[in-house]
Amino acid sequence: MSSHPTDRTVANGATLPPLTAGAHRKRLGLVALVATFGGLLFGYDTGVINGALRPMTAELGLSAFTEGIVTSSLVFAAAIGAISCGRISDGWGRRKTILLLAALFFVGTLAVVLTPNFAILVLGRILLGLAVGGASAVVPVFLAELAPYEIRGSLSGRNELAIVVGQLAAFVVNAVIGGLFGHVDGVWRIMFAVCALPAVALFFGMLRMPESPRWLVEKGRREEALQVLRTVRSVDRADAELAEVEYIARAEKASAVGWRAILGNRNLLRILLVGIGLGVAQQLTGINSIMYYGQTVLVESGFSESGALIANIAPGVIAVVGGIVALTMMDRVDRRKTFIIGLSLTTVCHLLIGVASMALPAGSPIRPFVILFLVVAFVGSMQTFLNVAVWVYLSEVFPLHMRGIGTGISIFMLWIVNGFLSLYFPSLVAGMGITGTFFLFAVVGAIALLFVATQVPETRGHTLEALEEDVSTGAIFVVAKSK
């Protein structure tokens, strides 16, 4: 990077003019706002089950295991959506793929709302899962490819913030609808129906949004790419940036590798395992068990069903606050440090929830409030130190030639682990109670902490090119070990 404060020497030796204010910056903000409706839908659809599950169970006669199937069917489908929609968007375009996802969100919502039985309900949840997984893979790429490098982190990070805002919205909507219509049969259908509104907004909003200029360049549509860039950059910046996009696209095409090359290189295989391990460790904190089954946990701790619906808003609020704080820390605190702090705090919270549920007898007036406080502390620790940081880390740690495979497989494994936790969490709570379940999370958290401390190298403060060289030679692991 150039030392000049207002320009930057880029990969092809050219100099990028500085960012300037104007209508193009407002246009970029509008594009980001519309695209992050995908993140909002992701959050709402994963959070709405939290309050809808108990009335749904009562109406459809679900068992603990079939509750797990209803919840986890979305998550397992999301794993398929994440790994397949990235490939679809490479061939079909980011914008068209997001339009497809908006349609999937809408159709899946209709299937759930109108379901006559368990089978159609699961089918609807699978459709929603494909859309959620697709959004988790395609929307951040769309934003990153449209963003100038100076604000790429904050612009791409808005999608993570939209996810936790969507979850909070689900908790608030659940509490309001549960309070107003809790006596109505099928109240859970109303909770799900709200999801149709942002799906419609995403679809019609994306009809007016541009395609990714990066994707257009890769398809040889240079003039279209330039036209798009000129709507979200100044004219001189757009012209200079197009040259860089063309240079990087050629470099990626020339250097792409497949599975055989990765498996044959010890350093590339190791960094892939680091990415998988970090994604799995994030999920093994049990964060999504709280986001999906928070009402169940709070009812088990002693809240009434209506009280749990209202109390459940607190973890949603702290998740949004934590996400905002995390975005401000991304360029200031080392990734390893945030991971270690986060896993230490979440593991302590697990231990304290287990101890509190054991020490405070059922019927104790303070028991539900102590456990609620600890759940809020856990969610705050997770969102502030682990959630956003893990997604940023996965987007930067892999060398250019394996970034698609590396991030795809890591996110796929993250969703699979999320799915198994979602499937078995109701059975765990039914069989072991809150005490045993959270002690188990604490043990797994300690193992994850050991993995991060010994195996995960630092990426902050390094250019992507420097990281690529260090990963390829193995130097990144030597530096991490010496520290």
Image (tube, rainbow, N blue to C red):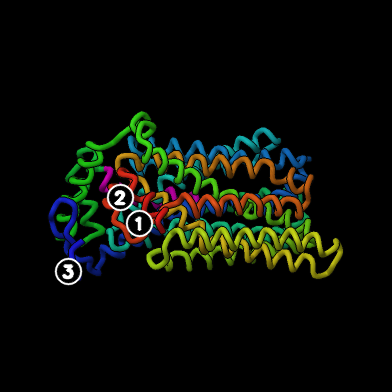
Q: Position of residue 81 (x, y in %)?
A: 48, 38
| Placement of 277 over or under 383, stated as above or below | above
- Where in the figure is residue 255, as x and y percent of width and height? 25, 37
| Kind of residue at disc 3 | His
Relative image position of residue 231 (x, y in whole percent): 24, 57
Nearer the observer, 129 or 260: 260
Q: Is residue 257 above or below residue 330?
A: above
Determine whether the residue tagged by mark 2 lies in a helix, strand or loop: loop
Q: Marks 1 and 2: in contact by CB < 8 Å?
A: yes
Q: Earlier in the sequence, mark 3 or mark 2?
A: 3
| Mark 2 nearby-residue class (10 Å; few <14, some 14–19, many ≥20) | some
The amino acid type of the residue labelled 2 equals: Pro
Q: Which residue is mark 2?
A: 210
Q: Earlier in the sequence, mark 2 or mark 1?
A: 1
Label whose residue precedes the other's in the sequence (1 or 3) = 3
Q: Is residue 387 visible in the rendered structure shown here?
A: yes
Residue linked to disc 1: 31
In percent of the image, x 40 and y 44: which residue is there?
Answer: 271
Segment tinted magenta in the rendering: 199-215
Q: Residue at x 43, y 45 (%)?
A: 137
Along the line of sight, which residue is nearer the eye, 298 or 446?
446
Q: Quadrant of residue 16?
A: bottom left
Q: Say which mark, if any, is on residue 360.
A: none
Give the Cα distance between marks 1 and 3. 30 Å
Badge 3 is on which residue? 4
For the point 50% across and 36% down, which residue is it?
A: 80
Tell me the quarter of the image containing the N terminus. Answer: bottom left
For the residues carrying marks 3 and 2, which lies nearer the camera in this image? 3
Q: Identify which amino acid the numbered label 1 is placed on.
A: Val
Position of 17 with respect to 210 (left or right) is left
Label 3 packing within 10 angstroms: few (<14), some (14-19), many (20+): few
